[in-house]
Amino acid sequence: MENKFVLEEKKRQKDFWFLLKTGNYAFFLLMFLLLINKHECIVIFGILLQGVIFFLFVPKKIKEFEERLKHITFKTQIFNLFVYPENPNSSNEQTIQTFHQTIEYLKTVGNVHEVRVYLILYRDVKIFCYWHDSKGNLQKESFAREEGATWQTWDEFLNMVEMFKNRNYEEQMRRFRSNNVSFDWVNENVFYTA
């Protein structure tokens, strides 16, 4: 299932690119007709204009569309997020920076679902959890990991992260289903149901 707002944005982007391609075909047809009628100067000017559009406008539009899609994804995020290292040699500073950027981005895009962001570092004894409450205040929570976390292997760490994510997901789904109004709202506004 995909977020209905993301699907709408993808459709808008697809429509834009279709319109741009159609306009290009019409433009080239016009340039061909002008070339046949011996208007070379206008054709050269038109091709230069087309080059400017493709080398200046299109790359900016691609970046803008990627940012809009990312923005919508974060704004409608309802499930908790987990930040942890990609591999055992990853820098903790980079992981922590990603954690803080994720929290700030959720606030910047206006996510009001109190999405919690968990920071789980390899061979650390605590799990940190930050989120913005409905009033916009940053809430912080931390709790200890199971004993032996400081000497576990990378595979054991990944298994622990997966178990933690699954347990957290089940708790969240129970919370959504405990209130029929919120469950219906989530199904109607977040998930695409065909």
Image: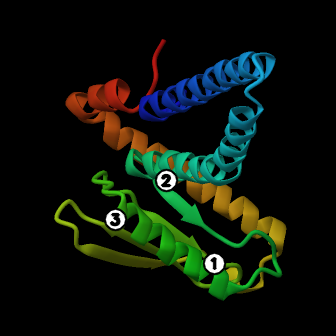
Residue 148 visible in image: no
Please tell me whether residue 151 is drawn above or below residue 13 in the rendered image. Answer: below
On screen, residue 161 versus residue 35, left or right, reads left
On screen, residue 26 versus residue 9, left or right, reads right
Give the labeled residue for mark 2: 168
How far separated are the C-alphas under marks 1 and 2? 20 Å
User: First in sequence: mark 2 or mark 3?
Assistant: 3
Q: Amino acid at mark 3?
A: Lys
Q: Which mark is residue 107?
A: 3
Residue at point 83% right, 75% down? 153
Give the x, y percent position of residue 192.
46, 23
How far separated are the C-alphas under marks 1 and 3? 19 Å
Give the x, y percent position of residue 154.
82, 72
Q: Amino acid at mark 2?
A: Asn
The crowd level at tag 3 (other Cα within 10 Å; few <14, some 14-19, many 20+) is many
On screen, residue 180 versus residue 125, left or right, reads left
Residue at point 27% right, 30% down? 185
Q: Between label 2 and label 3, give the one nearer the viewer.
A: 3
- Which type of secondary structure does the marked residue at label 3 adopt? helix
Q: Residue furthest front?
A: 38
Quarter of the image for residue 19 reads: top right
Q: Residue furthest left?
A: 135
Give the labeled residue for mark 1: 95
Along the line of sight, the residue nearer the viewer: 44 or 9 = 44
Q: Between label 1 and label 2, give the one nearer the viewer.
A: 1
Residue 138 visible in image: yes
